[in-house]
Amino acid sequence: MRDKYINIILVGYGGKKAKSFRINKRTLKFFLIGCTATLTGLLIFAVATFYQNLSLKTEVSKLREEKRKLTVLLAKEKRRTSYLEQFREKVEELEGKLITIDKFLRKKGIRKVPSGVGGARSRIDIFDVEYVSFLQDEAEKAYKYLSRIPLGPPVWGRITSRFGYRRDPFTGRYEFHDGVDIKAPWGTPVRATAEGKVIYAGWKAGYGKTVIIRHAYGFRTLYSHLSKIKVRAGRWVKPGDIIGYVGSTGRSTGPHVHYEVWRHSRKQNPLKYMYVRW
Ligand SMILES: [Zn+2]
C-alpha cells in the first residue's frame, strides 16, 4: 500500500528547530488543480478585458467621427436655412416691386388684368420654382408695359415753358401751350421716351423739324424744333433711341425741344410722365 501522505520538513538554521508537515496527497492534488484553474481563469479574464478595452476604444473613435460628421452637417443645414431665409426675403422684395409697378400701371389706366403676385400664401409656396418663374414672367411683362409708356424726358434740361395757358412769346396773347419746352444746347441728342412707331418725321408749320411717334395704349409723343431728324416715318424705335438733335427750327426763340404727350387724341401734361411718381 502506497503512502497516503507526504512529509515536508523545513530545516532550521542557526540552532532553530526543524519543522515537519504532513499533507494528505489528495489534498495537495486538489490544491494544485485549484491553483491551475484559478490562474487559467485570471488569464482568460485578463485577455477578455484587454480585447473589450480595444473594442471600446474603436467604438469611441467611431462615435467621435460620427460627431464630427454631424457637426459638419449641422453647419451645412444652418447655412442652407439662412440661404433659404435670404431667398424668401428676395422673393418678397421682388413681389413688392411688382405690386408697386402694377399699381402704377393701373393708375395710368393701362392694366386691369388681376395679377397673382403676392397675397396669402404659405411659406412653402415661395420656394416653388413655378412661382418664381411666374414672378419672372410678371417682371418681364411689367418691363414691356413700362417700355411702351412715354416715361422720362426726351432730353435733360431746364423746363422753360410748362403745359397750360401762357403768354405766347411771339403774339403776347394768352394761348394754350400743348406741351413742355425743355432748354438744351444745340445738337444735344433727343431720345424717344417709349417704344413705338415713327408716324411722322419732317417739317410741320410752326413746329419746325418734328417727329411724332405712336405708342401702345393710345399714346403719341411729339418732339419739335429739332435741328436734325435722325429717323424716318415707319421706323420702330425703342425707349432711349436717338430720333434727332436739339435745334430752333419753326416758331422758336432758341434751342429747345417742344415735347407733347397725347393719349386717345387728348393732350396730356407731359410733366406727369416726365417725373414719375410711383
Ligand atoms: Zn413749346
Image (cartoon, rainbow, N blue to C red):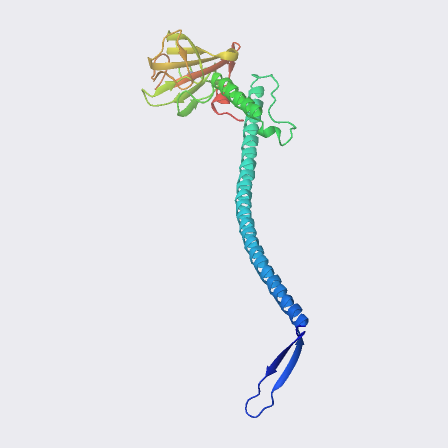
Q: Is residue 134 left or right of residue 191?
A: right
Question: Residue 230, position in %: x, y?
Answer: 34, 13
Q: Nearer the viewer, residue 2 or 220?
A: 2
Question: Residue 198, position in %: x, y?
Answer: 41, 9
Farthest residue in the front direction?
1
Tally the marks.
0
Farthest residue in the bottom direction?
15
**Residue 207 in view here:** no
The image quarter containing residue 109 is top right
Q: Nearer the viewer, residue 102 or 122?
A: 122
Q: Against 222, is 88 above or below?
A: below
The image quarter containing residue 187 is top left
Question: Residue 204, position in %: x, y?
Answer: 39, 8
Q: Is residue 195 left or right of residue 68?
A: left
The image quarter containing residue 171 is top left
Q: Quadrant of the C terminus?
A: top right
